[in-house]
Image (spheres, helix red, strand yellow):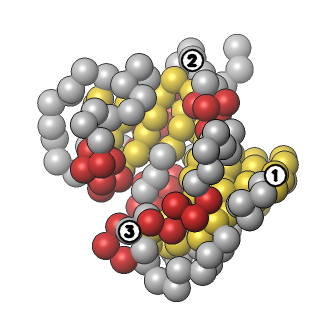
Amino acid sequence: MKNRKLIVYIATSLDGYIAKPGNDLSFLDRVQKKGEDYGYNNFISTVDCVILGRKTYDWVMGQVPEFPHTSKEIYVITRTDRPKEGNINFYSGSLKELVNRLKKEQGKNIFCDGGAEVINELLRLELIDEFIISIIPVLVGNGIKLFQDGRPEQGVELISVKQFDTGLIQLHYKTTKKKR
């Protein structure tokens, strides 16, 4: 039995922002191309669990009538207890305990869909196994940084690089364990 992996799949500007001020994601539009999903559907077929922060969840719910991925087990990381809604679990416990439990369970991989606070806490806890980061060809200058300060150094090993005609570059890394 192989362990499930926790994979961050996310887009960022060239200067490292996942959103402009005010949670503005309009810079993502510059790489929209009919029929191109940058491997997203392939990726999403390899996961059956999604973890995301409450702010990201609220933003998504402000854009669509129903949360995507409802066929998957979803954990919204929040500080406020809320009742479960279908497959959506509002989780306010230990992120470390949740991820370690999920990794031990049978199933496909686990998708971390953001946001920055959750990603950086997962980095601090050294729980992320892989990153698939799409670099959008724009310097936005300000906003929410993908990688925040105050976390330990962590090594990564390149798995692949994909270049698209829109200028988007997709980097796929796996994390390497520190030699102790």
Camera-side residue of 20 and 118? 20
The disc, 2 or 3, on the residue closer to the chain's N-terminal end is 3
* Residue 109 visible in image: no
Which label sits on residue 24? 3
Eyeballing the image, is 26 above or below 65? below
**Image position of 164 (left or right of 15):** right
What residue did someone put label 2 on?
A: 107
| Residue 142 in the image, given as x and y percentages of width and height | 47, 83
How far apart are the alpha carbons under marks 2 and 3?
34 Å
> Does the residue at mark 2 contact the one at mark 3 (Cβ under 8 Å)?
no
Q: Amino acid at mark 3?
A: Asp
Name the quarter where the C terminus is drawn: bottom right
Q: Amino acid at mark 2?
A: Gly
Eyeballing the image, is 178 above or below 159? below
Q: Residues within 10 Å of mark 3 (few under 14, many from 20)?
A: few
Q: In the image, what residue occupies the spot 36% across and 77% down?
A: 21
Q: In the image, what residue occupies the spot 43% across and 64% down?
A: 25
Q: Residues within 10 Å of mark 2 (few under 14, many from 20)?
A: some
The disc, 2 or 1, on the residue closer to the chain's N-terminal end is 2
How far apart are the alpha carbons under marks 3 and 1?
26 Å
Specify the quadrant of the image occupied by residue 5: top right
Q: Residues within 10 Å of mark 1 (few under 14, many from 20)?
A: few
> Does the residue at mark 2 contact the one at mark 1 (Cβ under 8 Å)?
no
Q: In the image, what residue occupies the spot 67% across and 71% down?
A: 137
Per the image, label 3 sits on a secondary structure element best described as loop
What residue did someone put label 1 on?
A: 162
| Residue 123 in the image, given as x and y percentages of width and height | 56, 57
Q: Amino acid at mark 1?
A: Lys
Eyeballing the image, is 49 above or below 37? above
> Does the residue at mark 3 contact the one at mark 1 (Cβ under 8 Å)?
no
Camera-side residue of 10 and 30? 30
